[in-house]
Image (tube, rainbow, N blue to C red):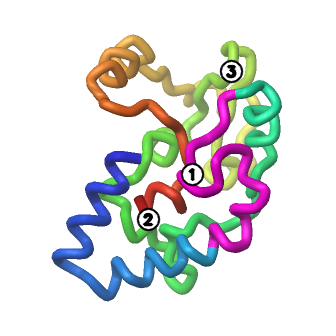
């Protein structure tokens, strides 16, 4: 969230028209999906209850990210993209480590063994250390972070 917000500040100063377009897409995304957001729809902070977390698993999964330019498919905030976007693609362990998630478009035609051979380890200890340095560990979605 903080990375995206910092990026939007830079864009507002350097490319105000692009920043305005991204903000508009984020506003439209929130109008469409905000009422179902499993958390505080005003602040964008994801709820922490088990019910909220379960609802989040299925929340807006088919919705295009507001950071994507629909004409080019380009991420307009690529330099400031969240960690999820930085690691999604290669196979990574999720949850308790039983599931191996990956971008299926990156592995069309690959066997399960080939996917497993590409597994990427995430340095969770380092991630935890870095999180301790961040003033807020609230979670949200891209649209709310862009508007911060």
Q: CA distance from mark 1 to mark 3?
A: 23 Å
Nearest the camera: 25 or 47?
A: 47
Disc 1 versus disc 3: nearer the observer: 1
Range of the magenta residues?
29-48
Dot 2 alpha-carbon crowd within 10 angstroms: few under 14, some 14 to 19, many 20 or more: some
Q: Hey, which quadrant is residue 30 in on the image?
A: bottom right
State the residue lying farthest toward the left: 14
Mark 3 = which residue?
95
Query: At 76% from the left edge and 36% from the top edge, which residue is drawn?
Result: 52
Dot 1 alpha-carbon crowd within 10 angstroms: few under 14, some 14 to 19, many 20 or more: many
Q: Is residue 48 above or below residue 14?
A: above
Badge 1 or badge 3: first in the primary sequence? 1
Q: Is residue 134 above or below residue 105?
A: above
* Label of residue 147 in the image: 2
Q: CA distance from mark 2 to mark 1?
A: 10 Å
Query: At 21% from the left edge and 66% from the top edge, which residue is drawn?
Result: 10
Determine whether, in the image, residue 35 is placed left or right of residue 5: right
Q: Secondary structure at mark 3?
A: loop
Query: At 34% from the left edge and 77% from the top edge, which residue is drawn?
Result: 19
Q: Position of residue 99 (x, y in %)?
A: 74, 23
Determine whether, in the image, residue 50 is placed left or right of residue 19: right
Badge 3 or badge 2: first in the primary sequence? 3
Q: Position of residue 48 (x, y in %)?
A: 66, 29
Determine whether, in the image, residue 89 is placed left or right of residue 8: right
Is residue 113 at least partly visible in the picture? Answer: no
Residue 45 is a magenta residue: yes
Q: CA distance from mark 3 to mark 2?
A: 29 Å
Mark 1 = which residue?
44
Q: Is residue 41 above or below residue 131?
A: below
Residue 138 is a magenta residue: no
Is residue 112 at least partly visible in the picture? Answer: yes
């Amino acid at each position: 969230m903080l990375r995206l917000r910092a990026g939007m500040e830079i864009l507002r100063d350097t490319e105000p028209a692009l920043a305005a377009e991204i903000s508009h897409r984020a506003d439209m995304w929130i109008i469409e999906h905000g009422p179902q957001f499993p958390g505080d729809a005003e602040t964008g902070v994801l709820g922490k209850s088990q019910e909220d977390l379960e609802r989040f698993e299925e929340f807006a999964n088919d919705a295009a990210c507001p950071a994507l330019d629909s004409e080019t498919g380009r991420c307009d905030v690529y330099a400031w993209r969240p960690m999820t976007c930085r690691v999604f693609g290669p196979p990574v362990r999720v949850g308790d480590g039983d599931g191996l998630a990956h971008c299926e478009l990156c592995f069309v035609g690959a066997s399960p063994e080939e996917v497993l051979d590409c597994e990427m380890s995430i340095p969770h200890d380092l991630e935890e250390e870095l999180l301790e340095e961040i003033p807020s560990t609230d979670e949200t979605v891209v649209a709310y972070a862009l508007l911060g």
